[in-house]
Image (cartoon, rainbow, N blue to C red):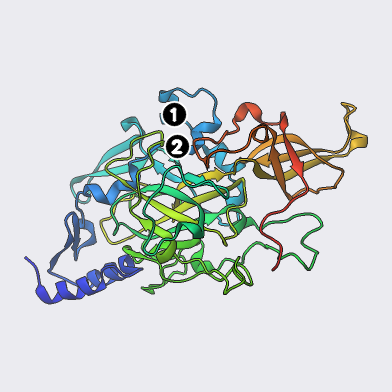
Amino acid sequence: MRNKNIEKILESLKGLAGSGNLLSTVAKGMTDYLLTLEPGDLIQSDPARTIAVPIAYDLWYLYVHDNLMVKYYDNLSVEDQRHKDYTEYISENLSFLSPLTGLRPMKVVRDLKQFVVEKAFDVYDMRVRTEYSNNGIYWINTLAFELWIKGLGAQYPSDGPKGYDPNDYIGYLSFPIGQLGVMEVISLFWETAISGYTFTGVDSDDSYEPKLPPSISDPDKPICVSPPEMFPPVKDSHGTIQPGMNYCFGRHLIDGTYRRSDTPAVPQNTSSSEWKSPYAPIANRDFELFSSEMKMYLEDVKPKLWARYWIHKDDTFPVPGEFVGILCKPIVAPPHVWWFQESTPFVYAGNWVETTHLTSGIVTKVTLEADRTDEGIGNEYEVKIQGCNVKIYPTDFYDYKVGDRVAILKLDSTMEKATKSFTWSDQAYFDETDKDTVITNYLIIPATFYKRKH
């Protein structure tokens, strides 16, 4: 039985960012009512009895595909992939996430053995209580991408967002997506937006625009959930209920559960490439829902569809070789079950995004020529590429220091002229057997990306 007046109030609140917090607060004060928001979503005045079976679209993000982290581990069997502990990969290869304390990839159950159910008899209530816990594995869906150079178009075209002009874009990022209304915010983030971009001899040059680590406000920082629970936390990271604020780090693609974000980012340049007003990224111009299928993807993602973020020619990301990811912040309106995630938002998809000829990495160690034991010429550098620590050499005698992001030329790709765009399926990945080895077909070059002022 439904109370029509209260139903109208709740309906007016639905779709707002932060609505989960607000709805749960409103519902708490409503006694003697049973309210239905959507199929499968029940609210009762007694929180102890608030329960419903989640319906399929609530949990689309738990239906996963092509774990990026698997590529780092050589020859894992399918069975091993179901149980692999990727904690080491996260701490070493994704260490740049550390400024966002608590941010984690999502956890999923790939084997029912990982879903632990413990039952105990409660003498006080005279009933059996059931405790659930998820010992599932971390998962990052592989982000598809395509980048092209002048004169070469897309291999996998799509209609693009409204008003799309293919001459305005140089590539796209694509990821599988389910029903809207489940995630309060879906946002895009990238490595240098968290860690900054340091390059020897350039940041002190007035002709270059420095890219410093950002000052991330507390409301935008992820909430660490420890120990993980079946339901997402009710409060935002700032601890109060303020609907409509869409708190979540990154460039927002979806706000308020359904709406492509119409808030432009701060312009990244002083003018456009055509010497006009600077380009300001905005999702309702650059984000396509829903796009053409990515036919080369390793797994069929149906019944999910595909979304694309188109990279504008005046954008200043991605820096070749940096990690680019998608964050999902679930709504908290009960009984949204999120199956023991460890942060809100969580990393849903991602990839190391390189170009045909170029990538980059972070210098972790410098061995001066005088200290080398192999009689080699020049300094030897240990560099994290795709988060994997390898040894490579420079093309010249320019001195780089620990912490610098250095541009890297992929020699094998320069042997022939590029005849098609570069996609995620063309990209080579480092694995654990490459760690701490010398990579002779990669060279550090004295270059930087996107940093010269107009």
Q: Quadrant of the N terminus?
A: bottom left
Kind of residue at disc 1: Gln
Residue displayed at 12% across by 77% down: 5
Q: Marks 2 and 1, Cα distance to the nearest angstrom?
A: 9 Å
Image height of 138 relative to 8, above or below: above
> Which residue appears farthest toward the left when viewing the image?
1
Q: Is residue 440 left or right of residue 63?
A: right
Residue 374 in view here: yes
Image height of 10 relative to 211, above or below: below
Closest to the observer, 184 or 376: 376
Kind of residue at disc 2: Asn
> Which residue appears farthest toward the front when viewing the image?
151
Residue displayed at 41% across by 24% down: 79
Image height of 16 relative to 327, above or below: below
Coordinates of residue 143 in the picture (x, y in percent) = 46, 44
Q: Which residue is mark 2?
A: 67
Which element type, helix, strand or loop, lies under badge 2? loop
Q: Residues within 10 Å of mark 1 (few under 14, many from 20)?
A: some
Coordinates of residue 350 in the picture (x, y in percent) = 49, 46
Q: Residues within 10 Å of mark 2 (few under 14, many from 20)?
A: some
Dot 2 and dot 1 residues touching (CB under 8 Å):
yes
